[in-house]
Image: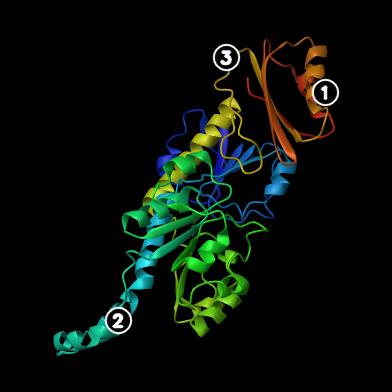
């Protein structure tokens, strides 16, 4: 029997995927499902094996502390990509047409008996421009970036994409009409609209700042539906006031930006659709079920992807450990000294951490598992079968 705990409301479409082998239990859970709940100071029980974020970002999860405890951290990349893409498209339209200004004016005149005549006189105050044939720069061609690029191509925009780490899958899915540029400065200097879709890392923090804004065309529109700190808010506020940036659209409210009339800010609505929440929950549940039942890892932010399918031998053991030399020889030696034959194994690493699985011709007894646990650098050992 496996136990799970939800720190936030999780879509029932996801939770219904759990079989009779699972039950919800707040105490001694094997896995935690979370969306936005803050886990920085969350206490980890010895029984906890995994944390699954029903979403892409894991800023609320202490990933390093999880790794040192041998806890696998999953996320659900791409599950909410369409919801974010559609919000980006709405941002493009809100930036080019003064829809919000027109709505506010219409509401302010709702009691005016001459509203129809006044409308024809006032509509020129809310005139905009079309996005067709405008140049859109997409920085980051992951799950969301590719969808945005493809949709913008369909809307008649000229699309330029930058991503030095673009995956093979992304390359296959990207519309061939997109111009893939190798220098990000081309996007900064040539595009009418720039949208960022990269993860928040030390090297991407404040990617949009005074220096990069100075390279851009006067009247550029910048969209940030990825992570707030990708944009230096102080520099953006200054650029909005000067007119260098015509509009800034963000999904991350900041007081400094909200004070600017040419900023259009939403309260982190990118994945706030029923479909996105369902997709994220279903992906998260499938990931943890495969991990708990088979030991397989897919979409972990701290450990490598590993898949040995469903166990068919008499035993399967998984080990989370520090990525240093001579670890595998210690594992195999311990198993061999105990008379256990290794039928198959898989070992991969990701940064400072590594994960391996052994399929065995006979079950590993408790004393063997204890010996492996005592090897320096081992964080967690689990008997899967």
Residue linked to disc 2:
126
Residue 312 image label: 3
* Residue contact at pointers 3 and 2, CB within 8 angstroms: no
**Res. 1 in view:** no
| Sooner in the amino-acid sequence: mark 3 or mark 1 | 3
**In which quadrant of the rendered image does the C terminus lie?**
top right
Image x and y of residue 33, in percent: 55, 44
Instruction: Please tell me in which quadrant of the rendered image residue 294 appears.
Output: top right
**In which quadrant of the rendered image does the N terminus lie?**
top right
Front label number (3 vs 2) = 2
**Res. 330 in view:** yes
Q: Is residue 356 above or below residue 11?
A: above
Image x and y of residue 135, in percent: 41, 64
| Sooner in the amino-acid sequence: mark 1 or mark 2 | 2
Is 283 displayed left or right of 292 in the figure?
A: left
In the structure shown, which secondary structural element does the residue marked by tag 2 occupy? helix
Mark 1 and mark 2: span between their CA atoms? 72 Å
Residue 330 image label: 1
In the foreground, 104 or 242: 242
Front label number (3 vs 1) = 1
């Amino acid at each position: 029997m496996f136990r799970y705990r939800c720190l936030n409301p999780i879509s029932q479409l996801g939770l219904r995927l759990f079989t009779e082998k699972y039950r919800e239990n707040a105490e001694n859970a094997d896995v935690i499902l979370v969306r936005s709940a803050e886990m920085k100071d969350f206490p980890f029980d010895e029984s906890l094996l995994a944390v699954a974020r029903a979403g892409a970002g894991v800023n609320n999860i202490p990933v390093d502390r999880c790794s040192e405890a041998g806890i696998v951290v999953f996320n659900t990349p791409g599950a909410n990509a369409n919801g974010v893409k559609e919000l980006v498209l709405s941002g493009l339209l809100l930036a080019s047409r003064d829809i919000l200004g027109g709505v506010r004016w219409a509401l302010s005149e709702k009691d005016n008996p001459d509203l129809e005549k006044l409308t024809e006189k006032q509509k020129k105050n809310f005139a905009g421009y079309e996005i067709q044939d405008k140049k859109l720069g997409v920085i980051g061609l992951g799950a969301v970036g590719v969808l945005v690029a493809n949709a913008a191509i369909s809307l008649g925009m000229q699309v330029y994409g930058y991503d030095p780490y673009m995956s093979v899958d992304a390359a296959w899915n990207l519309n061939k009409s997109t111009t893939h540029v190798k220098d990000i400065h081309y996007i900064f200097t040539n595009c009418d609209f720039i949208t960022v879709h990269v993860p928040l890392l030390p090297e991407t923090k404040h990617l949009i700042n005074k220096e990069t804004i100075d390279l851009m065309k006067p009247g550029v529109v910048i969209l940030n539906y990825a992570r707030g700190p990708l944009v230096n808010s102080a520099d953006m506020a200054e650029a909005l006031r000067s007119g260098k940036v015509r509009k800034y659209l963000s999904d991350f409210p900041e007081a400094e930006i909200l004070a600017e009339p040419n900023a259009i800010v939403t309260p982190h609505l990118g994945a706030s659709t029923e479909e996105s929440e369902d997709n994220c929950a279903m992906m998260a549940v499938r990931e943890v079920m495969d991990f708990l039942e088979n030991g397989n890892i897919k979409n972990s932010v701290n450990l490598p992807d590993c898949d040995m399918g469903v166990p068919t031998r008499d035993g399967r053991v998984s080990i989370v450990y520090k990525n240093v030399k001579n670890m595998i020889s210690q594992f195999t030696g311990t198993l061999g000294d105990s008379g256990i034959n290794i039928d198959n194994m898989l070992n991969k690493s990701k940064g400072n951490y590594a994960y391996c699985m052994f399929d065995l011709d006979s079950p590993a007894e408790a004393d063997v598992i204890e010996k492996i646990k005592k090897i320096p650098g081992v964080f967690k050992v689990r008997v899967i079968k």
